[in-house]
Image (cartoon, rainbow, N blue to C red):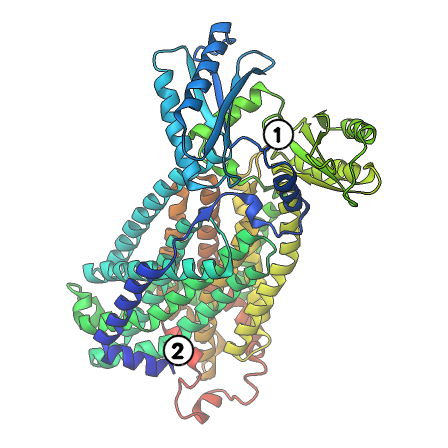
């Protein structure tokens, strides 16, 4: 099949390119716009308590909403606000209210909205929509900021706006600049590395142009699929897609070009060499992409919409890249011919691979030592996993120089830690009857008695009298570990255990959302990890026709996962702040899936050499010598593209960039080049059981099929 696809693409290049251009134009014109979101509540299923609480709030208290933005005012000299300052804040709020910003219903302040130390005054901005992630609302907050700045020109006051809409505006602007920076840095890195490897400007530029086209197609397909599936995409998805597409796409292009160059050196004509290379490498690329797609598809089992959406988006991205690698890349290089390598002449000469040969010789002579040292290194690095601490507030990853972040920090210092975002408790009569005010007062007192609760407001009863709301201010910052533990523990226990009879109770607010996210993620870890591992092992078993090799390959990749996450903990996690809660899932899927690709290449070459009748030591030496150039080049480029994320201001992207880049380098240079060949040597021919049951040294099964390369996966090792 892959040989037929390769020949079609090579012999009809203009048709293939035209089909891609038409598909690109159609998707750009017809696909809906991808709308990322930062609202974590939108990623939870409807059965979680915090989501049901939000539904009750919207129905029973539509007029009682949290402000879309909060203006934080203070003196430039850091002193206490004077009466004149407070009056000035009131006049500013009145002036802003008179400006009538779109989707902003009220801009109000209160003389009592001053911090206990007298240094901060607040202005509340209420929206006419309940969708705090509304783009028009965010734009209005931006205009409101400008208007406030104009009014304060030359005054002793300074200000900053924070809150949901203000944070969305800042994060979107930061995301746009990050995407541009990541795209530029990724392009430069790939071009420079390809130029060093092939010494050809055409090869350095062409993959970037091809993948750029693939990126446009991918975004259109993802937007369409997300719209049909009703999934929201996380705001960071664009930056992640950039590095995945350019990293994986360059990897697959390298697989083809290395094999193409090998056939040219053997004396084949350019078109025949490219068609043969596309046919043989197609199996390798498809298997590599299949493993990655299987890992990403496992995320669809997540109860978190954020992870499900990310899994769908990344699986689509890799699938489109696979199709491009099998069709578009061969078509483009078919038109270029050997001119693609200009001006370098190196493609005509057989490389010596001196360093790779030395590594292969050492691994073949000392397999037990190599396995012990490389495995021990991974184990030691993995010790950092035990110190992992999850951070569930994605807003904490935003750059500290953003206005909304700085304003929130000042607000929380001036008021009680939980004052900026109280937890909401709702009590609803199951029979629709009016609630007893005496019982509600007693209930309030019981909530007030919970350790860690700072203040509980009197019950606010809805118009029908059957629903009451309590605003609960905690002693802790809304996203702090202590707040999540309190809401998920003593507070919810008291809310449900001490409530008036005949009522339903719900705990809502951002802290409750984060607590539910914590519960959902812990559940997902127990489901997604095993399912992804089983899916990858099944694919490996089918590809390698073995039950033994996939087992130690997955153990090796598991060690790589532990080493990667452990190193990230040591580098990024300090005493107070944890790491992004999604990081273990991201590391697990990327390192397991992509790291397995390099192991497949190495194991396939080992199998080829052993099946040809070579002694184990010689087989290891040859396999490592022939595979290292491809694995090293692909890993350096892929790790570099993910490493680019470390240039972002967003701490989440920095953590992700380091973790995946480090994991890929571990997978390539420690696992694929050292650990896997050493363990395969120690296991011997049993590694291929039961697929080797009819084989004999010197040929066997392969010869029975009529050609040495009868096993399509054997070709993978020749990259």
Residue 454, position as x, y percentages in the image: 70, 24
For residue 11, side relative to residue 151 (left or right):
left
**Residue at x 73%, y 29% (from the top left corner):** 459
Q: Nearer the viewer, residue 71 or 294?
A: 71
**Residue at x 47%, y 35% (from the top left corner):** 165
Q: Is residue 591 visible?
A: no
Q: In the image as oriented, which residue stretches furthest toward the top?
A: 83
Q: Is residue 255 visible?
A: yes
For residue 630, side relative to residue 606 (left or right):
left
For residue 239, side relative to residue 421 (left or right):
left
Q: Nearer the viewer, residue 609 or 541?
A: 541
Residue 544, position as x, y percentages in the image: 51, 77
Q: Residues within 10 Å of mark 1 (few under 14, many from 20)?
A: many
Residue 43, position as x, y percentages in the image: 56, 49
Looking at the rendered structure, the secondary structure element under dot 1 is: loop
Q: Residues within 10 Å of mark 2 (few under 14, many from 20)?
A: many
Q: Provide the residue designation for mark 2.
A: 715
Foreground disc of the pair 1, 2: 1
For residue 427, side relative to residue 517 (left or right):
right
Q: Provide the residue designation for mark 1.
A: 477
Q: Nearer the viewer, residue 537 or 519?
A: 519
**Residue at x 61%, y 41% (from the top left corner):** 58
N-term mark: 1 or 2: 1
Residue 508, position as x, y percentages in the image: 66, 39
Image quarter hosting the N terminus: bottom left
Marks 1 and 2 sit apart, C-alpha to C-alpha, by 57 Å
């Amino acid at each position: 099949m892959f040989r037929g696809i390769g020949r079609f693409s090579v012999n009809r290049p203009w048709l293939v390119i035209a089909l891609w251009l038409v598909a690109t134009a159609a998707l750009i014109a017809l696909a809906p716009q991808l709308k990322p979101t930062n609202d974590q509540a939108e990623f939870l299923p409807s059965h979680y308590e915090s989501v049901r609480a939000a539904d009750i709030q919207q129905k029973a208290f539509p007029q009682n909403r949290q402000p879309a933005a909060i203006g934080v005012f203070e003196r430039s000299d850091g002193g206490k606000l004077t009466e004149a300052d407070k009056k000035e804040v009131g006049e500013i709020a009145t002036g802003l209210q008179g400006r009538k910003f779109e989707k902003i219903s009220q801009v109000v302040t209160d003389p009592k909205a001053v911090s206990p130390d007298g240094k901060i005054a607040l202005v509340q901005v209420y929206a006419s929509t309940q969708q705090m992630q509304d783009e028009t609302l965010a734009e209005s907050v931006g205009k409101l900021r400008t208007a406030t700045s104009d009014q304060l020109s030359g005054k002793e006051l300074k200000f900053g706006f924070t809150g949901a809409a203000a944070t969305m505006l800042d994060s979107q602007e930061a995301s746009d600049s990050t995407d541009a920076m990541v795209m530029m840095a990724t392009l430069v890195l790939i071009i420079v590395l390809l130029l060093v490897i092939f010494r050809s400007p055409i090869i350095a530029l062409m993959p970037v142009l091809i993948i750029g086209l693939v990126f446009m197609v991918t975004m259109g397909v993802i937007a369409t699929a997300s719209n049909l599936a009703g999934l929201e995409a996380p705001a960071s998805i664009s930056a992640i897609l950039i590095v995945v597409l350019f990293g994986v796409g360059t990897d697959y292009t390298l697989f083809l070009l290395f094999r193409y160059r090998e056939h040219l050196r053997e004396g084949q004509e350019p078109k025949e060499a490219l068609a043969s290379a596309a046919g043989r490498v197609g199996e390798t690329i498809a298997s590599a992409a299949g493993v990655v797609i299987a890992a990403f598809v496992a995320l669809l089992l997540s109860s978190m919409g954020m992870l499900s959406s990310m899994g769908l988006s990344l699986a689509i991205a890799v699938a489109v890249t696979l199709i491009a690698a099998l069709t578009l890349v061969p078509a483009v290089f078919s038109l270029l011919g050997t001119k693609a390598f200009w001006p370098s002449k190196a493609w005509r000469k057989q490389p010596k691979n001196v360093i790779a040969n030395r590594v292969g010789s050492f691994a073949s002579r000392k397999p037990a030592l190599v396995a012990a040292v490389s495995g021990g290194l991974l184990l030691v690095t993995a010790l950092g996993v035990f110190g992992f601490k999850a951070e569930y507030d994605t807003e904490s990853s935003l750059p500290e120089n953003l206005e909304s972040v700085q304003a929130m920090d000042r607000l929380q210092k001036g008021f009680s830690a939980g004052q900026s975002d109280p937890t909401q408790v709702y009590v609803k009569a199951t029979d629709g009857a009016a609630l007893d005010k005496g019982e509600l007062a007693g209930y309030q007192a019981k909530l007030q008695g919970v350790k860690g609760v700072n203040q509980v407001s009197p019950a606010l009863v809805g118009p029908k009298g059957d629903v009451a709301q309590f605003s609960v201010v905690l002693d802790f910052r809304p996203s702090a570990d202590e707040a999540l533990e309190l809401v998920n523990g003593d507070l919810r226990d008291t809310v449900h255990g001490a409530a008036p009879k005949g009522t339903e109770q719900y705990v809502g607010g951002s802290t409750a959302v984060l607590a539910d996210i914590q519960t959902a993620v812990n559940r997902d870890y127990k489901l997604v990890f095993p399912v992804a591992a089983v899916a990858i092992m099944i694919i490996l078993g089918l590809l390698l026709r073995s039950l033994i090799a996939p087992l130690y390959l997955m153990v090796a990749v598991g060690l790589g996962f532990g080493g990667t996450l452990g190193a990230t903990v040591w580098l990024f996690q300090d005493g107070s702040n944890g790491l992004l809660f999604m990081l273990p899932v991201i590391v697990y899927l990327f390192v397991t899936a992509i790291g397995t690709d390099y192991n497949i290449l190495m194991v396939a070459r080992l199998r080829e050499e052993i099946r040809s009748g070579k002694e184990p030591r010689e087989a290891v030496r040859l396999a490592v010598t022939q595979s290292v150039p491809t694995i090293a080049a692909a890993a350096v480029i892929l790790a570099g593209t993910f490493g680019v994320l470390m240039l972002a201001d967003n701490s989440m992207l920095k953590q992700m960039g380091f973790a995946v880049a480090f994991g890929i380098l571990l997978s390539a240079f420690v696992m694929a080049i050292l650990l896997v060949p050493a363990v395969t040597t120690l296991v011997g021919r049993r590694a291929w059981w039961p697929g080797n049951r009819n084989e004999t040294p010197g040929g066997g099964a392969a010869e029975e099929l009529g050609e040495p390369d009868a096993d399509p996966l054997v070709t993978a090792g020749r990259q």
